[in-house]
Image: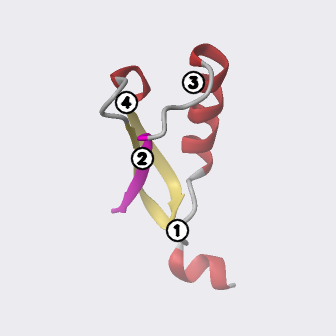
């Protein structure tokens, strides 16, 4: 019940100044709660498999619709 109150659709992103190969964004049905959306986590996992450990300046965020 609590999840429904604060979770809403929105856009997520990953940004990295030192290595723009990590830059990406997407839509998610559920964003909120100060945690990475599921789709963001999945993309991050794929990037780690391809590029290795993420740079220290990798940041993520989301915006609710």
2 and 4 marks in contact (CB < 8 Å): no
| Front: mark 1 or 2 | 2
Residue 4 place in picture, x, y as percent = 60, 77
Q: Which residues are magenta?
A: 57-65
Specify whether 49 is left or right of 15.
right
The residue indicated by pointer 3 is 47
Question: How far separated are the C-alphas under marks 4 and 1?
Answer: 20 Å
The residue indicated by pointer 2 is 59
Foreground: 49 or 32?
A: 49
Question: Magenta segment: does it hold 3?
Answer: no
Residue 13 place in picture, x, y as percent = 39, 43
Question: How far separated are the C-alphas under marks 3 and 2?
Answer: 14 Å
Q: Picture quarter containing residue 27?
A: top left
Question: How far separated are the C-alphas under marks 1 and 2?
Answer: 13 Å
Q: Could you tell me which secondary element the residue under label 2 belongs to?
A: strand
The residue indicated by pointer 1 is 34
Q: Picture quarter containing residue 21?
A: top left
Mark 3 / mark 2, whichever is N-terminal:
3
Mark 2 / mark 4, whichever is N-terminal:
4
Mark 3 / mark 1, whichever is N-terminal:
1
């Amino acid at each position: 019940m609590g999840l429904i109150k604060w979770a809403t659709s929105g856009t997520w992103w990953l940004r990295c100044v030192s290595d723009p190969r990590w830059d990406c964004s997407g839509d998610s049905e559920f964003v909120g709660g100060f945690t990475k959306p599921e789709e963001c986590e999945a993309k991050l996992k794929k990037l780690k498999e391809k590029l290795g450990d993420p740079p220290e300046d990798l940041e993520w965020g989301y915006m609710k619709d």
